[in-house]
Image (cartoon, coloured by chain):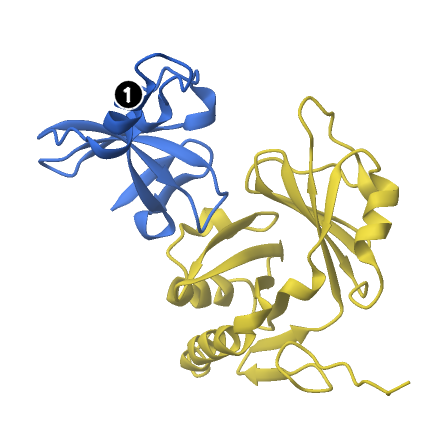
Chain colours: A blue, B yellow
Amino acid sequence: MLIPHPLLGLRDSQEFTYLGDASLMNRPDPSAVTAEADFCDYVFLRDNPAGVHRELWFHEQGDRSWLIVTRNTLTHEILGAELARDLPARGAK
Amino acid sequence: MTDLIPLTALGAVDARTARFGALTLTEDDSLGLASLTLRKGQAAPTPFGLTLPEVGAMTTSGPYGAFWTGANQWMIIGAGQGTGDFAALVHAEAPNASITEQTDGFAAFHITSAAGPDLIPALMAKLVNLPPAAYAPGHATRTGLEHMTVFVLRPSDTQISVIGMRSYAASLWHAISVAAARLEHVPV
């Protein structure tokens, strides 16, 4: 599987490590009244979509950037990759 | 005071070298390395007169060189600077950037071809899963080599350098030398 790194071009997915759903970038507000329930959801609950999924990949054996890779979980087709730092902090979805 | 004898990354007093046909593999025990990272909003300095290279590129100037390792981050290399305080030299050249000594964390191996540039991609095809453009002359990149993280530098068309973690220098030497030995009798 090849991942189209926005800076370095196509790279072997073995150079990357996978973290999970890109919505992890949207950390709940710890000072909110509902913070405990929000963090419970944030830490423990994940969607498991069949189809297009946005997920965080770390280019560990590369430039050590975080990417948001759009992948189809049914076909494993990689639809795109962007640098996580280019996205607004709460705009990962 | 006790007289201590410095050992190379491969554990010997002298740097190792081996020939495989037209390919020569050399351990470089005197390469100084320091990482240079820009802080937020800083303009890129020009240490030793080097213009810090773009993504995936390297540049050299005399004994010094620089290659891109990440966003706003480069490795500065100095041939023959492995025994002194190389980070202090780089810091004097770029006082505002963040400089970290890297010399003793890494082991460097140079591979030179006496039979023209074609042998270099033939060797790398056995070692790394990268398109040849990623290690064309003037390029440098980081990748995995037999599950080890390495920097691959191509200073000229007949030379390629592999810089890996010092703790697995022997495994890296083994991987490169096995691949080079398989090319020993390939006609060029």
* Residue A88, image x, y percentages: 43, 15
Residue sitting at 61 percent across and 81 percent down?
A: B10
What residue did someone put label 1 on?
A38
Residue sitting at 82 percent across and 38 percent down?
A: B94
**Amino acid found under the numbered disc labelled 1:** Asp
Left/right of residue B88 with respect to residue B108 in the rendered view: right
Residue sitting at 36 percent across and 15 percent down?
A: A91
Left/right of residue B95 with respect to residue B155 in the rendered view: right
Q: Secondary structure at mark 1?
A: helix
Vertical comparison of A3 with A91: above or below: below
* Residue B57, image x, y percentages: 60, 43
Check the residue under mark 1 and report the chain it is in.
A
Q: Residues within 10 Å of mark 1 (few under 14, many from 20)?
A: some
Vertical comparison of B5 with B151: above or below: below
Q: Nearer the viewer, residue B161 or B8?
A: B8
Q: Quadrant of the N terminus of chain B?
A: bottom right
Q: Where is residue B27, by image quadrant?
A: bottom right
